[in-house]
Amino acid sequence: MNYILKAFEELTALESMRIYRLRQQVFMLEQECLYPDIDGVDPSCFHLLGVQEEQLISYLRIVPPGHHFKEPALGRIIVTPEYRGGNPGLELIRKGIQLCRKTYPNEAISIEAQFLLQTYYEQFGFVALGSVYQVDNIPHIHMKLKTFLS
């Protein structure tokens, strides 16, 4: 897997199309969730693409502090259906955490996790905060990964 990190303005038109198509395929069609995916936050984010043989396999965006949470966040975390349950998801999140810590050192990292994936994110050290809430008719929970001093 080749990981590519780009600011929004560095993405090619083809990369942008692949990102939006994957997000639409998973969040809107597979999960049957109608919501404004193009939320105006993408231009402020870094975009991490997991690419294999020119195919977008996995993706997440690193959201700067102050856009959704006080601290930076990982969002729109996706692995294509045929690659789920294996290393691509683990690698993507580990790489996202590493890059987020490099970009925003000594800050906690938040995610708005689907509640069904709470234990999945706990294996990376994320801790649930507060109670479960609905986002577009899907139960979610705010989770945070505390920073560490190296």
Image (cartoon, rainbow, N blue to C red):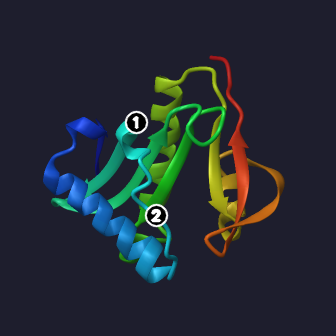
Of badges 1 and 2, nearer the viewer stands 2
Q: Residue at x 38, y 55 (%)?
A: 59
Q: Nearer the viewer, residue 113 or 20?
A: 20
Check disc 2 and report its element: helix, strand or loop.
loop
Crowding at dot 1, Cα within 10 Å, few <14 / some 14-19 / many 20+, comes out as some
- Residue 24 appears in the picture as rendered: yes
Q: Amino acid at mark 2?
A: Pro
Q: Residue at x 48, y 24 (%)?
A: 102
**Mark 2 or mark 1, which is nearer the start of the sequence?**
2
> Is residue 19 found left or right of 112 in the rendered image?
left
Give the residue furthest to the right.
130
Q: Position of residue 23 (x, y in %)?
A: 38, 65
- Residue 80 appears in the picture as rendered: no
Q: Amino acid at mark 1?
A: Ser
Please determine whether, in this image, residue 21 is positioned above or below residue 112. below
Quadrant of res 3:
top left
Q: Position of residue 31 (x, y in %)?
A: 51, 79
Q: Which mark identifies residue 44?
A: 1
Q: Position of residue 61 (x, y in %)?
A: 43, 46
Quadrant of res 119:
bottom right
Residue beneath disc 2: 36
Please determine whether, in this image, residue 18 is positioned above or below residue 126. below
